[in-house]
Image (tube, rainbow, N blue to C red):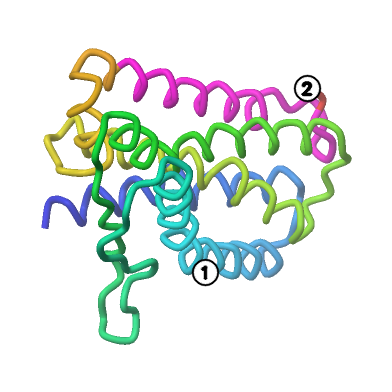
Amino acid sequence: MTDKVIVTIELALIMVFPLIIFYQRMKNGFKSTFLNVVLLYLIWFFSYALLHELCHVLGSWITGAKIGDYQLIPRYWEGDYKNAYVGSIFENGIQGFISPISPYIRDIIFLFVGYVILKGKKITGSFVDGLIVVLFVLSPIYDIFNNYFGFVLDARNDFSAIRKVTGSFWTHTIGLLFTLTGIFIFWRLFVRIKNMRIFDL
């Protein structure tokens, strides 16, 4: 029950509230904001696990690790909204490091790509603008924070696998560095707004 409460709070603080604030600052009406937020959340929800797990597949493929079993998306049709995984068989430290960390490397790349895109275009509060914010900014931040915070709370996840290769110190260093990078880019995109319709970064 506690895990569900934590995840709900994370979703609200990292995904939903920032998206609402984004559209409010663009002076969108209530109806437009509501529809955009709902649609964008659904797009994110049903693509998040797939994109995350595909990164594990790519990391395993690049390093030559064998994939014993996988489930790229939760079984939504069975009421399972959580479980997705890639069961790779690691034969060396490189495989044991690259495959687990691949989704978070993708997150960092997406964050910088999102920053460059939003910095270089006029933001009008359209659905496309929101999609960029969700997929390239909010989703990567959520992915990093949710998994690293879970690791800090002693959950068995990707960062636990990374710890087996790098040790606790470097695992926490990576987790904190990635988290702070996400927070910094988030701050640049959402706090430093001088014009309600144009990001002046």
Q: Give the side of residue 19 with respect to residue 164, left or right.
A: right
Q: Which residues are magenta?
A: 173-199
As helix, strand or loop, the secondary structure at mark 1 comes to helix
Q: Is residue 184 above or below residue 51?
A: above
Image quadrant of residue 184?
Answer: top right
Quarter placement of the C terminus:
top right
Which residue lies at the image location 70% right of the left edge and 36% below the top edge?
A: 113
User: Was residue 189 drawn as part of the magenta stretch in this picture?
Assistant: yes
Q: Residue type at mark 1: give it.
A: Leu
Q: Earlier in the sequence, mark 1 or mark 2?
A: 1
As helix, strand or loop, the secondary structure at mark 2 comes to loop
**Residue 54: image x %, image y %?**
46, 57
- The residue at which mark 1 appears reads as 42
**Residue 53: image x %, image y %?**
40, 56
Q: Residue type at mark 2: give it.
A: Leu
Secondary structure predominantly adopted by residues drawn in magenta: helix
Q: Is residue 148 above or below residue 181?
A: below
Q: How many marks?
A: 2
Q: Give the side of residue 170 with respect to residue 136, left or right.
A: left
Give whichever of 59, 49 is nearer the camera: 59
**Residue 96: image x %, image y %?**
28, 36
Q: Give the side of residue 163 with respect to residue 36, left or right.
A: left
